[in-house]
Image: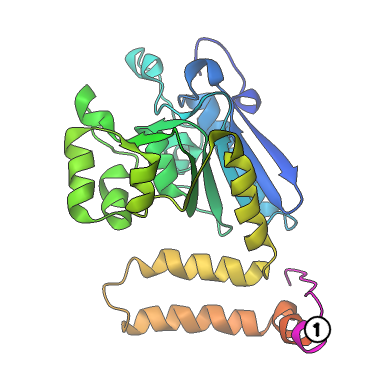
């Protein structure tokens, strides 16, 4: 815990808005740098989103002018951990090793450096402000991008681009990140959360079990080198079989035939 004695609940908040859960990193005085309280709060919020059948998508954003400045270096310098006490398996920020089956969208409202970019890399989709900057400057501080950055970055941008980012530690603009496919949308700063919510609501309008099965298979498919691997197809068929047995799989065609919007139950 930081010496400001902030509580986990205050370090990040969860707001429910329809079928979307909004996690806000809430240490604006420290540019939302990650300490143990923030990691605990974000991890708990993800658990809440995962467990709440009414929530179908999560959005994560930052309070103030930054998304996340990475790890709280003052905490590290003092020898204090920045992971969630008792839930170290969640990883940095309570998030980077804490997958949930519901899509997570990063609404990058300002700069996201070091661990901030690693949070972005752990999300499924990204909406960034025009003024946002992303980068992995750990090598400038005698560290490395050990919260997933070293191996997630080259999976999301071309290998040579990832290597330059990792070796130089220099940041990239939101527009450059868009061009390389690291972010989905770049919007004016005041519209980041609204744009992320628009994207979240378009996902939440779909069958929740279908979206969750798709995310699980997409995530697990990274472990297989070939799209013809029999084990991958076994996973694919397992997910599809479970969906076909659901009530929503019956509701979708029925709603189409009756020319009305489907009423998903998540069952």
Work out whether residue 156 or residue 219 is closer to the camera in this orientation and state it: 156
Q: Is residue 144 above or below residue 222?
A: above
Q: Residue at x 46, y 53 (%)?
A: 184
Disc 1 crowd rating (10 Å Cα; few below 14, some 14-19, many 20+) is few
Per the rendered image, the range of residues in magenta is 255-267
Q: Residue at x 39, y 47 (%)?
A: 121
Q: Position of residue 51 (x, y in %)?
A: 68, 53
Residue 193 horizontal side relative to residue 93, left or right: right
Residue 26 horizontal side relative to residue 168, left or right: right
Predominant secondary structure, magenta span: loop
Q: Position of residue 248 (x, y in %)?
A: 72, 77
Q: Say which residue label 1 marks.
A: 259
Tell me, yes or no, whether the highlighted magenta stretch contains residue 2. no
Counting every numbered tag in the picture gives 1
Q: Position of residue 194 (x, y in %)?
A: 64, 44
Residue furthest toward the front?
Answer: 188
Which SS class for mark 1? loop
Q: Residue at x 45, y 24 (%)?
A: 33
């Amino acid at each position: 815990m930081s010496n400001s004695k902030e509580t986990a609940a205050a370090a990040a908040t969860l707001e429910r808005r329809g079928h979307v859960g909004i996690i806000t990193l809430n240490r604006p005085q420290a540019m939302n740098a990650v300490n143990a309280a923030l990691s605990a709060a974000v991890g708990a919020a993800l658990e809440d989103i995962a467990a709440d059948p009414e929530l179908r998508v999560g959005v994560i954003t930052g309070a103030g002018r930054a998304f996340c400045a990475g790890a709280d270096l003052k905490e590290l310098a003092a020898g204090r951990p920045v992971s969630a006490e008792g839930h170290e398996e969640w990883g940095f920020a309570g998030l980077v090793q804490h997958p949930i089956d519901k899509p997570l969208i990063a609404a990058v409202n300002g700069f996201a450096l070091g661990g901030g970019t690693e949070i972005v890399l752990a999300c499924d989709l990204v909406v960034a402000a025009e003024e946002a900057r992303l980068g992995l400057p750990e090598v400038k501080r005698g560290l490395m991008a050990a919260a997933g950055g070293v191996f997630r970055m080259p999976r999301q941008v071309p290998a040579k681009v990832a290597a330059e980012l990792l070796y130089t530690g220099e940041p990239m603009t939101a527009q450059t990140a868009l061009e390389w496919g690291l972010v989905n949308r770049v919007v004016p700063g005041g519209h980041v959360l609204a744009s992320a919510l628009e994207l979240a609501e378009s996902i939440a309008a779909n069958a929740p079990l279908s979206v969750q099965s798709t995310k699980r298979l997409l995530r697990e498919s990274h472990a297989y080198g070939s799209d013809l691997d029999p084990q991958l197809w076994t996973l694919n068929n397992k997910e599809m079989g479970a969906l076909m047995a659901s009530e929503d799989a019956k509701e979708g065609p029925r709603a189409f035939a009756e020319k009305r919007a489907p009423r998903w139950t998540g069952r």
